[in-house]
């Protein structure tokens, strides 16, 4: 039986799984859902699935026919996310149980992604964006959203990443100073 996605999300919140699964905050999950609702992306890539909490916020706003791929290194979490997506009727969601760098190096890109959500391997965000560009996995108009830019701003790697995204001509970048902090960037 397929359950109501908003009720399912509420039950995930009530179970207080946030800490165990390192889910994004409820505020940022709602921002993420609204960005997807406005942008209507047809090809979405998420890096860092966990139990599928942020993925469900993306999936519930996707237009019909959209592709959603999400990458998770931990096999138990990947399985749990698959079950959670299935419970909500999102069988088309593709959960890839892999390290992000193995996934990126194996991925044969025929079409880029028009929405990318980064929520894993924070110290490697810059490297990940570099590979996405090199492999032409981003298009003009693609949106990149990254979590933890405020919570991790004390680290040089995050300062460097935010500075890079702000200064690079190809990107139009803002930081949303809410909870752990979202970087929201559009490819020109
Ligand atoms: C912050 S949690 C993701 C939370 C999720 N986006 C949400 O809000 O529901 C980060 C996840 O990324 C996974 N992860 C960490 N390093 C990774 C890597 N190199 N490749 C793929 N997944 C990774 C972790 O196992 C963890 O489940």
Image: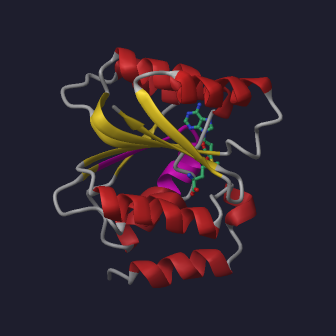
Q: Which residues are magenta?
A: 68-80
Q: Position of residue 17 (x, y in %)?
A: 68, 68
Residue 155 vertical position relative to residue 42 in the rendered view, above or below: above
Q: Left or right: where does residue 1 sit relative to residue 122?
A: left
Q: Nearer the viewer, residue 73 or 138?
A: 138
Residue 80 vertical position relative to residue 184 in the rendered view, above or below: below
Q: Nearer the viewer, residue 55 or 165?
A: 165
Q: Quadrant of the C terminus?
A: top left
Name the residue at the right extreme.
154
Q: Nearer the viewer, residue 27 or 172?
A: 172
**Residue 73 covered by magenta stretch:** yes
- Would you say residue 50 is visible in this rendering? yes
Residue 12 vertical position relative to residue 102 in the rendered view, above or below: below
Q: Left or right: where does residue 22 sit relative to residue 173?
A: right
Name the residue at the top extreme.
134
- Would you say residue 52 is visible in this rendering? no
Instruction: Name which residue lies at 73% across and 45% down.
Output: 150
Q: Nearer the viewer, residue 153 or 101?
A: 153
Give the quadrant of residue 115. Answer: top left
């Amino acid at each position: 039986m397929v359950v109501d996605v908003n009720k399912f999300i509420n039950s995930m919140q009530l179970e207080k799984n946030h800490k165990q699964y390192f889910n994004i905050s409820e505020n940022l999950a709602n921002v993420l859902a609204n960005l997807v609702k406005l942008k209507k992306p047809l090809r979405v890539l998420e890096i860092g699935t966990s139990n599928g909490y942020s993925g469900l916020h993306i999936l519930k706003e996707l237009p019909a026919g959209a592709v959603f791929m999400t990458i998770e290194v931990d096999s138990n979490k990947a399985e749990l996310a698959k079950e959670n997506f299935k419970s909500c009727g999102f069988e088309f969601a593709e959960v890839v149980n892999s390290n992000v760098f193995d996934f990126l190096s194996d991925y044969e890109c025929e079409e880029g992604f028009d929405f990318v959500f980064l929520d894993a391997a924070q110290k490697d965000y810059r490297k990940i964006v570099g590979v996405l560009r090199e492999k032409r996995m981003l298009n003009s108009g693609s949106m990149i959203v990254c979590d933890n830019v405020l919570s991790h701003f004390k680290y040089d790697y995050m300062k460097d990443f935010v500075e890079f995204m702000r200064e690079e001509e190809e990107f139009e970048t803002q930081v949303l100073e809410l909870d752990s902090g979202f970087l929201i960037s559009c490819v020109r």
